Image (spheres, rainbow, N blue to C red):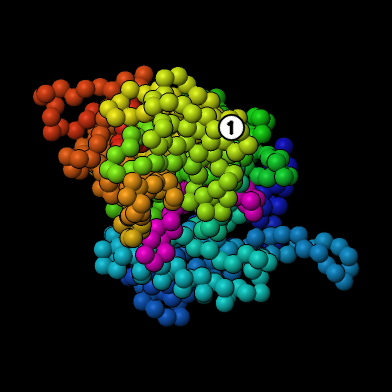
Amino acid sequence: MVDFINRVRQALGGSGDASVSYRRNEWLPPNDDHLLWNLTLSGVEDPLDADALWDNSGGSGRHIRELSSGEPNRRLCRALQDHRRWVRLSDPNHGRWVLGDRCFTDVILSIPQRAWDQDIRATGGERIEVAAQNLIFRHREAFKASLPTGRPPRYLLRPDPQLPDDRVVSLFGPAVFLPDPEDQPAFDLLPSLNQAPLVLESLRWLPTGHTHAQPPGFYADQECLLLTPEGRGPIPVPGWHTPDDAYLLLRRTGVNEWAAYGSSGNDWKASERRHGDGWVFELRSPDGQAKQILSLELAPAHLGQQQTVGDAGGTLIPGLPSPVSPYTLELEAIALPALHQGLRQWTIWLGQDGTLATPEQIGRYPDTLIRVQLDGRGLSLAIPGEPLQTLGEHLTEPVEIGQTDAKLLPFESPGGRGLLSLPRPDLYSPAYERRLLGRTDPTNPGSRPDIALDQLAQPGGLLWSNGIDPGFTLCNLSVSRSHAWIWVDGDQLLAEACKPNCSLMHLDRNGRLQPMQDDQEGQALRIPPGDGLLAGNYLLRFRSKGG
């Protein structure tokens, strides 16, 4: 079995045996059975000087040394040159396969938190972006002959609060994969530890003028995925701590075929099984250790679905150095509002799977979308190919929405008409630090709040009595750009409105509104695990690892 696993790792560019001849140039100590390489540079004067990090030919790098050897010339270029992805290549002259190598293309660069924060304050992150672009340029020019076909270099910079101010860490290898910033996952990741759901970090890019986050997932052109304990690796699992170098490796073996592997150096047991259209992978701790079961469900993603996952601890969130929080906020429903402020009609657009439609879907093929609507005649439900359903002024009983898992439900709230229950909640992650909940300003997307509720920013959703369209969406009418401060205190979520007109309500786990007592006026709402927070029209369920 060990030999088989070693062959699998070798196929990925790793190996169980580092002494083989084709690895004679390697000098970095391997991590996770040669699936990762970790280059640490010390004596760094400017962590954003790409030239100094790349090689010792220029820049501000006269004191830079590779940490384990003390060598000044062992920098990123040399590391990529001496540590390669080994692949099978066709020999056209002899009609056979030969062993060849290709340069690794994807690099995660961790820099000190202080340097990160200084650049965010001083330039809005422009030097961070310039450093990434310069490294991409140097990488492409130095290795143009050995880059994989159709795979340009990709760099992700992130802050690390544990790094000293004079160190920079580069992570690369077969298990480091960075998707194209415009790609969406082909498969969603649903992890849990000892049956408690987890939220993984999102990838957060920082182009000029705006941030862009991608949910963790398995992408169409991805070959393998590596989950590691908290604090290390490209995808660390929050709350997973081990006394050994355990990991869970997923490798795609077919269109929807997968295999799971654990570390060859310990007795953690990996397994896989089918689950509907997806797969479930498990890694169990060995006898003699505290019982831990890491589970990962791989579910086919719905095309066009945009899900916000794991904002807390996301790689590029300035000013939030905390690790991923063990708490989650689940956007599980939308409270249907009444007509007000001169509204004649509102429409909420749903995709064919019942999820909230994206602006792109609405612009491209609105006739294929489901519509929940309120006008002067009451609520209605329009499903393509079916007669219009009229539902009255208020929902008095549950209503199924076609073949989807979304539902319309009765809901008692001041001025409300009912509740739209979503088939799959978007996940956010609060923490002990105060975080701003609100919506993104479309005229200034760079001022995105920590937790952005933008699902109702659907174009063409409002009709006004005066016939004038001020350009609003239901998102504008639901939450303010700065709506509430939220944070965790003990095991409870605290929510404090930014302004008196920013609506916040506490719902118990059965959906009943909890009135505020007289002595609580002006104080933050306290939401225990399992209860809900109604922020504007967004119903968020607060959960902890214990449920």
Question: What amino acid is found at the position of numbered circle 1 in the picture?
Answer: Pro
- Position of residue 443 relative to residue 398, above or below, is below
Residue 39 as seen in the image, left or right of residue 510: right
Residue drawn at (29%, 44%), measured in percent from left and top?
A: 342
> Which residue lies most toward the bottom here?
58
Depth check: 502 or 522 in front?
Answer: 502
Residue visible at 52% across and 54% down? 363
Question: Is 243 or 525 nearer to us in this picture?
Answer: 525
User: Magenta includes 540?
Assistant: no
Residue 29 in view, yes or no: no
Pointer 1 local density, CA inside 10 Å: few below 14, some 14–19, many at least 20: few
Q: Is residue 206 magenta?
A: yes
Q: At which x and y percent is residue 74?
A: 49, 69
Residue 397 lies in what quarter of the image?
top left
Q: Quadrant of the C terminus?
A: top left
Please state if 113 lies on the left or on the right of 178 as rendered.
left
Q: Residue furthest right?
A: 94
Q: Nearer the viewer, residue 418 or 517?
A: 418
Nearest the camera: 300 or 376?
376
Q: Where's residue 422, x and y in %?
A: 47, 33
Q: Picture coordinates of residue 533 (x, y %)?
A: 31, 31
Q: Residue at x 42, y 64 (%)?
A: 207
User: Where does the image place residue 372, in percent across and percent down from the top left?
Assistant: 47, 36
Residue farthest left in this picture? 519
Question: On screen, 478 above or below 116?
Answer: above
| Residue for badge 1 | 387
For image coordinates 60% across by 73% down, the residue present is 143
Magenta region: 201-230
